[in-house]
Image: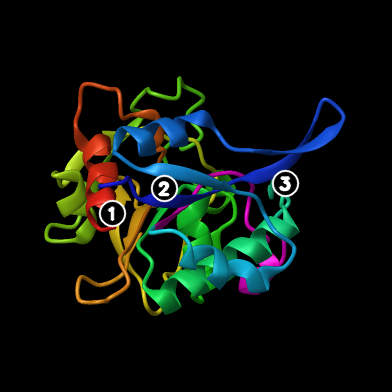
């Protein structure tokens, strides 16, 4: 039986004077280790291609990256807003809608969890340090595979089932997070300071979508099994 193809979103950036498509290799490694074949998907200008693209794959992984433009959820930009990528925003929002309509299993990571929430009508915390004083340092500045803080996961949730745990330590490289969840989504994990770390569709929803705020792709080779199990569970849905 051949391995399932999974669309893996990427960004575009100017590197050495040329605009290039890029995505961290850790995503490729994590998906391949889970028995999947990632197909790197650049941000396309023609968002009407989203449904066609997803019809050719078994699953969708929304990767991390730039801040989501606050105009997309009706907010004025914070002075602490980072780089935004308008073409990527438009493309990934279209992918979310196409995945929902076709019930394509979706794993959303870091920026990805934020994109899913915004696409379906939710809002974001634009900058945790300035909007949530006293929060943990979520831009930890540590090694990619260093576990920076603990999170609590709702028992019985899709995320708890995927991880095989309801309390675990995660890495942390973000200054934005989910604020108000979209109507079709529910928060299923938080760090001890209340910042959202997990979001998903209901267990009875035909669309399997799980989002995490940390970077599990950087943790699949660590001693702890949680992040490997997250990718393995996603693979099992395809």
Q: Categorize mark 1 by other alpha carbons within 10 Å: few (<14), some (14-19), many (20+).
A: many
Q: Residue at x 46, y 21 (%)?
A: 142
Q: Earlier in the sequence, mark 2 or mark 1?
A: 1
Helix, strand or loop at mark 3 = loop
User: At which x and y percent is residue 139?
Assistant: 51, 34
Q: Earlier in the sequence, mark 2 or mark 3?
A: 3
Q: Earlier in the sequence, mark 3 or mark 1?
A: 3
Q: Is residue 140 magenta?
A: no
Q: Is residue 105 visible?
A: yes
User: At which x and y percent is residue 218?
Assistant: 40, 29
User: At which x and y percent is residue 28?
Assistant: 45, 35
Kindly check if marks 2 and 1 are in contact, taking CB atoms under 8 A apart as contact: yes
Query: As rendered, which of 1 and 118 lies closer to the eye?
Result: 1
Q: Which mark is residue 179?
A: none
What's the CA distance linking mark 2 and mark 1? Answer: 9 Å
Task: Tell me the quarter of the picture where residue 20 sits.
Answer: top right
* Quadrant location, the C terminus: bottom left
Taking 105 as reference, is 165 left or right? left
Residue furthest right in the image = 17
Q: Residue at x 30, y 66 (%)?
A: 208
Taking 74 as reference, is 111 left or right? left
Q: Categorize mark 3 by other alpha carbons within 10 Å: few (<14), some (14-19), many (20+).
A: few
Q: Which mark is residue 83?
A: 3
User: At which x and y percent is residue 63?
Assistant: 51, 47
Q: Which mark is residue 213?
A: 2
Q: Which residue is mark 1?
A: 189
- Range drawn in magenta: 59-77
């Amino acid at each position: 039986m051949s391995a399932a193809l999974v669309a893996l979103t990427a960004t575009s950036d100017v590197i050495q004077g040329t605009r290039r498509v890029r995505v961290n290799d850790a995503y490729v490694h994590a998906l391949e280790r889970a028995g999947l074949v990632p197909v790197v998907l650049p941000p396309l200008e023609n968002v009407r291609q989203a449904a066609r693209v997803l019809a050719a794959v078994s699953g969708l992984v929304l990767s991390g990256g730039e801040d989501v433009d606050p105009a997309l959820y009706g907010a004025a930009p914070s002075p602490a807003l980072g780089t935004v990528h308008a073409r990527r925003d438009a493309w990934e929002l279209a992918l979310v809608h196409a995945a929902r309509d076709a019930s394509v299993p979706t794993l959303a990571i870091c920026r990805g969890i934020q994109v899913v929430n915004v696409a379906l009508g939710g809002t974001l915390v634009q900058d945790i340090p300035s909007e949530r004083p006293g929060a943990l340092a979520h831009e930890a500045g540590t090694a990619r595979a260093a576990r920076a803080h603990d999170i609590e996961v709702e028992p019985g949730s899709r995320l708890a089932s995927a991880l095989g745990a309801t309390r675990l330590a995660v890495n942390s490289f973000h200054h934005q997070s989910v604020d108000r969840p979209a109507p079709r989504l529910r928060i299923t994990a938080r760090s001890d300071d209340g910042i959202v770390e997990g979001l998903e569709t209901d267990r009875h929803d035909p669309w399997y979508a799980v989002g995490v705020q940390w970077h599990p792709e950087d943790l699949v080779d660590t001693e702890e099994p949680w992040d490997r199990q997250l990718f393995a569970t996603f693979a099992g849905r395809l």
